[in-house]
Amino acid sequence: MSKATYQPDINDIRAVYLGADDLKVAASILYNAYFDDPLFNDIFEIDREGYESRLRSAIREELNAFWDAKQPMIGLFEQGRLLAVACLISPDAAFGAGRYWHWRLKMLLTTGFLGTKQMIYKEEKVRESISAKDYHMLSFIAVHPDHQDIGLGHILMRGIIGLLQEDNKTEGVGVFVTLPKCLSFFVDANFELVKELEVGQITGKVMFRKKING
């Protein structure tokens, strides 16, 4: 079904947490969404043979680490089909840039030392830019390539905001944006620019959305 003809029935779309059986499809959606992302192009060396394999492996290991650490992964489903996904890190320093030792080991084996080091460096620098103490970090957000530009991203963002409102500890959510075309999406969701940040050869924007209390 093409983007031109597909129109979601809002009443049929559910925002729920992903289960273990959803991770494979989620990885595919994220792979397609981030394939042309300049940050991932730089980290995993798009001009060197094996870029696709390194990117797939990195996304797979990220999702497995999220699952093992019980971090929130929200999916949009229509009649059982996963259409969009968002992965967040909760206000828990134990799952910060250090990750788990087995995640780091798998990343080293599958994506190489440089890619693993840059992934960790990127997260450390983004976190250093945000002044809040306890907050969520939006690591991934993506819509299935067949169903983009029809509002699913905004529905998914409402699910993220709902998660923030239910968490008494969090002060908000941060994100690192490297694609200019995505800036308006986050601005529309009331994210504010914190600072521009250079990671490797890429310059992006650290943005933050404060939790609205009351």
Image (tube, rainbow, N blue to C red):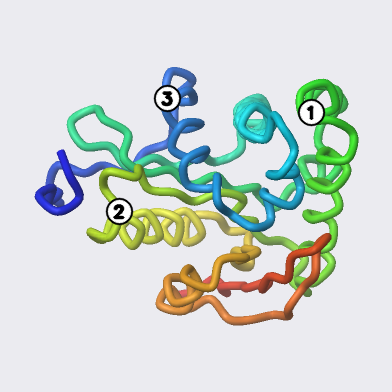
Query: For mark 2, what is the residue?
Result: 148
Pointer 3 and pointer 1: residues touching (CB < 8 Å)? no
Lower position in the chain sequence, tag 2 or tag 3 = 3
> x, y (%) of residue 131?
78, 74
Q: In the displayed structure, does residue 70 sit left or right of residue 78?
A: right
What residue is at 73 percent from the left and 80 percent from the top? 195
Mark 3 or mark 1: name the one nearer the start of the chain: 3
Residue 172, above or below 81: below
| Position of 199 relative to 102 (above/below) | below
Q: Callout 3, which amino acid?
A: Asp
**Other-residue count near label 3 (Cα within 10 Å), few / some / many at <14 / 14–19 / ≥20:** some
Write down the quadrant of residue 12 in the picture.
top left
Residue 107, labelled with which disc?
A: 1
Q: Is residue 21 above or below residue 116?
A: above
Q: Quadrant of the C terminus?
A: bottom left
In the image, which is nearer the foreground, mark 3 or mark 1? 1
From the viewer's perspective, is 78 left or right of 11? right
Please give the label number shown on residue 22.
Answer: 3
